[in-house]
Image (cartoon, helix red, strand yellow):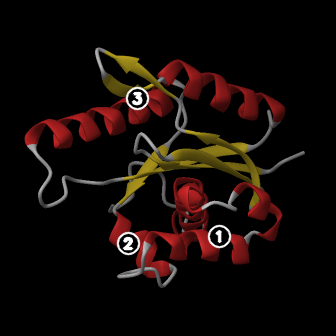
Amino acid sequence: MARSLTFGVDPGLTGAVATLIDGVPGPILDMPTFDVGGWGEVDCRAVVVFIRGVRDQHPDAVVSACIEKVGARPGDGGTSAFRFGQTTGKLQAVFEVLGIPATRVVPAVWKRQFGLLKQDKDAARLLAIARFPSAASVLTRKKDNGRADALLIALWHENTQLASGLTAGDSPF
């Protein structure tokens, strides 16, 4: 029986929700989306179904999550920044409604831990393959960087927040 179940979330529309089960990669969900008036939005219902399914397979595990806390990037317009914030908020609400404590971490913090600052997006994918050889088959394409980021965010959470005994409300990030 699993002792810990950790969800890592890269919240972009091309992101992913990844799981670590006792530190080992489990199921990964590419961010499900649907079209609303020509705009992509996160399908929260599909995320909930995924999370419940994984959690139900590990009923005695301690469950937690970490969502990447990303702000507007230079050059992003107001609409783009708003939409990204809306996506992140919807994902935070999913974990809150499911009663799963979720911390947030800015990219620079988790990337620094893994030596990924000022590296291209593919560096995280290659690191995730090296760290989790069992997940290599789902990280074969360059566009799998959202999956890799989600796995590394979950690992950062386990190594820093859970290892130090911090809870969602205690996190300085």
The disc label shown at residue 128, or none = 1
Q: CA distance from mark 3 to mark 1?
A: 27 Å
* Amino acid at circle 1: Ala
The disc label shown at residue 44, or none = none
Front residue of 1/28: it is 28
> How busy is the neighbourhood of tag 1: few (under 14 within 10 Å), some, or many (20 plus)?
many
The disc label shown at residue 109, or none = 2
Q: CA distance from mark 2 to mark 1?
A: 17 Å
Indicate left or right for 34 with 76 as reference.
right
Mark whose residue sits in front, 2 or 1: 1
Q: Position of residue 148 (x, y in %)?
A: 59, 61
Q: Earlier in the sequence, mark 3 or mark 1?
A: 3
Instruction: Determine contact: label 2, label 1, CB under 8 Å.
Output: no
Q: Position of residue 37 (x, y in %)?
A: 28, 14
* Amino acid at circle 2: Val
The disc label shown at residue 93, or none = 3
Q: Earlier in the sequence, mark 3 or mark 2?
A: 3
SS at badge 3:
helix
SS at badge 2:
helix
* Amino acid at circle 3: Ala
Residue under the image location 53 percent in, 18 percent down: 45
SS at badge 1:
helix
Question: Which residue occupies the extreme right position in the image?
Answer: 1
